[in-house]
Image (cartoon, rainbow, N blue to C red):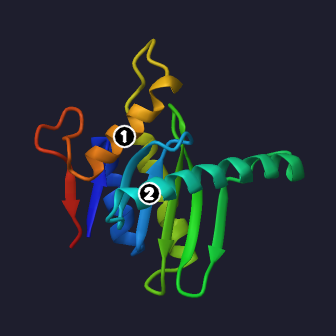
Amino acid sequence: MRTHVAEPWVEVPLQHFVDDARVLFALLLHPNGQVLGQFGFTRAVDVMAACALAAGIHASAGQLGRELDGKPFRELYHSGRERQIFIGEVRTPRDGLIFLTAFGDDSSLGLVRVFFAALSTRIAAAVPARPAGAPLQSESLEQDLAHSLAVLFGKVPPAGDAGGSSSTRS
């Protein structure tokens, strides 16, 4: 399986998490649904659906936490019959990001939480500073999403990478 990234600085932290935590799927995205990197998905439509669901779940859980406890819920966990899902917030100096992962019997919630903490630290250290005067533009969201998916699935190379950026999991 391959780790695909839309932003080159995401590749190393995401690949470390995938290798260490032994997960089936992993997805790092902005709260607006724009994907930064993924592992385990083979179709763009699945990535789009997972991004939309993760962003919606994160926003809903945040508001529910504020209503119930005065602060947003930052991590969510669900145990299914065959797979478990973990959603967490990655805090960076620039933005808060959402991380979704699914795992089976080869991993555990404890391992995922330990390696999620390491991933959060690595992402926070790797995220580039936003250039002055360059806020996220909501009107370009659809273009950004389409571009990110094209990069993830090898249709165009990431910015600053003439050959594309992906790595193969050992």
At 41% from the left and 49% from the top, the residue drawn is 122
Report whether residue 137 is seen.
Answer: no
Residue topped by disc 2: 27
Q: Residue furthest top?
A: 133
- Pointer 1 local density, CA inside 10 Å: few below 14, some 14–19, many at least 20: some
The amino acid on which the numbered mark 2 sits, given as a three-letter code, is Leu
- Pointer 2 local density, CA inside 10 Å: few below 14, some 14–19, many at least 20: many
Q: Are marks 2 and 1 in contact (CB under 8 Å)?
A: no
Q: Is residue 15 left or right of residue 34?
A: left
Name the image quarter holding residue 6. top left
The amino acid on which the numbered mark 1 sits, given as a three-letter code, is Ala
Residue topped by disc 1: 146
Quadrant for the N terminus, please. bottom left
Quadrant for the C terminus, please. bottom left
At 42% from the left and 72% from the top, the residue drawn is 21
Label tally: 2
Q: Which element carries disc 2, helix, strand or loop? A: strand
Pair 2/1: label in front: 1
At 65% from the left and 73% from the top, the residue drawn is 78
